[in-house]
Amino acid sequence: MYKYIKILLLSFALSFSFAESSMAQEKQKITEQDYSNNEIEMADVMRSNGKIYIVVATVFSLFAGIVVYLVMLDKKIGALEKNISDDSI
């Protein structure tokens, strides 16, 4: 039964991925102005409003949370490995 569910989910995932590629946008021609454009409007607007710091703080806090989680997980795994090695002796 699980095998059929996996096949069904895989077929849905593949059909959606192919459907997305068939609805791609038309290509746009790249001009010299595109190569000489050094401005990033979104970053400039966010920097002028002071919101870029919120984005940086959010990314930093997510990264810090992931690092803390991994360190705690490593400690727990180390303790379990130590318990298993002590029990086998």
Image: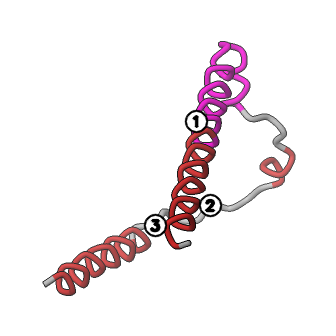
Q: Nearer the viewer, residue 69 or 50?
A: 69
Above or below 13: residue 71? above
Q: Nearer the viewer, mark 3 or mark 1?
A: 1
Mark 2 and mark 1 lie on one chain; the one further toward the N terminus is 2
For the residue pair 19 and 12, the one nearer the viewer reads as: 12
Say if 4 sits above or below 55 in the image: below
Q: Are marks 2 and 1 in contact (CB under 8 Å)?
A: no
Residue 37, position as x, y percentages in the image: 82, 42
Foreground: disc 2 or disc 3: 3
Q: Residue furthest left?
A: 1
Front in this rendered view, residue 6 or 16: 6
Rendered image coloring scheme:
secondary structure
Q: Are marks 2 and 3 in contact (CB under 8 Å)?
A: no
Q: Residue at x 62, y 27 (%)?
A: 55
Find residue 28 and name its label. Answer: 2
On the image, the x and y values in percent for residue 80 come to: 51, 58
Going by the image, does 7 lie left or right of 40?
left
Marks 2/1: CA–CA distance: 41 Å
Provide the residue designation for mark 3.
Answer: 24
Q: Which residue is mark 1?
A: 65
> Magenta stretch containing residue 53, yes or no?
yes
Q: Which residues are magenta?
A: 41-67
Dot 2: element: loop
Amino acid type of disc 1? Gly
